Amino acid sequence: MSEKHKKRCGVISLLGEPNVGKSTLVNEITGAKVSIVTHKAQTTRARVRGIKVHENTQLILIDTPGVFNPKRRLDKAMVLAAWGGFAEADIILFILDVSKGLTRGSEGILKSIADMGIIDRTLVLLLNKIDRINTKKLLKLSEKINEHLNFHMTFMISAKKGYGIDDLVKWLSVTVPFAPWLYPEDQIADFPLKIFAAEVTREKLLIRLHQEIPYQLTVEPDSWIVKSDSSIKIHQIIYVTNKRHKGMILGKNGEIIKAVSIAARKELQEILNLDIHLFLQVKVRNNWLNEPLRFSNIGLSFSN
């Protein structure tokens, strides 16, 4: 078999600060909603794998939590998950929001990568949100960042608008190693549907809620029942740390929780093309941020 027709498969890990566009990029490349996306930082909590097939190549994209200065146990677990994706990757995509420039946080990530002395992985710079900056500033920024590390390639993209994505996918497809595919051809993600459904509900909560509440809650699947008419009955539990937060999530006369349920159900129906019956329950669990089981259900490692 000629090299042109041999199968390729590679793991590509996305790394960067919170809210630089990692999840948006994974969704754009896969052509489907794999990761939840909001305007709030730290929306992604655990590693999410999106899968893209391009010609004879299967790309496995690891969307990771943003790297930031962690304080709480949950924050530390999220940052650990981000660097964990680094270890299994053939190619590392470092993503920068050009509208913010080279921040102290991004400089810290670049220094950490340099200190690791990575020599066996391909390191790529992605300058994202290029529609928000003029060309002169963009080129200067590219030069400045490439002075920090010897990137193999630099791509200038807009994940939200799709600019430059085709060129990126084509390059990745001929750069990953020759290897058998790890997933069926029609699979676009690697996580249970019930976990994805819980993440969709959390996304709607993040959009509706403000201040500290989104970071003090988690959504877990309780039951998933496929009925005789092929519709799905889903029960989920929203855990919060105190009664005040529970009241704010419920809203006056249950208005907020109803709106969240409607929005999540509508999106799940569109994605799954099935009738969905979604039931949400809010429970106070004061110490969930220190419970190993809660971390495991999110997909994070719990450490003391």
Image: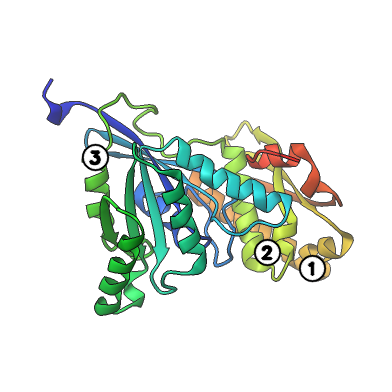
Task: Say which mark, if any, is on residue 259.
Answer: 2
Q: Earlier in the sequence, mark 3 or mark 2?
A: 3
Residue 101 location (% of width, % of height): 41, 72
Q: Residue at x 49, y 41 (%)?
A: 85
Q: Residue at x 64, y 58 (%)?
A: 262
- Which residue is labeled 1 in the image? 251
Closer mark to the observer between disc 3 and disc 1: 3
Decide if residue 144 is on the left or right side of residue 273. left
Q: Quadrant of residue 69?
A: bottom right
Give the quarter of the figure containing the C terminus.
Answer: top right
In terms of secondary structure, where does tag 1 sit? Answer: loop
Residue 89 location (% of width, % of height): 41, 38
| Pointer 2 with pointer 1, Cβ within 8 A | yes
Frontmost residue, 255 versus 32: 32
Frontmost residue, 54 versus 42: 42
Q: Earlier in the sequence, mark 2 or mark 1?
A: 1
Residue 294 location (% of width, % of height): 74, 41
- Which residue is labeled 3 in the image? 175
Residue type at mark 1 is Gly
Q: Calculate the distance from the C-alpha at mark 2 to the C-alpha at mark 1.
A: 10 Å
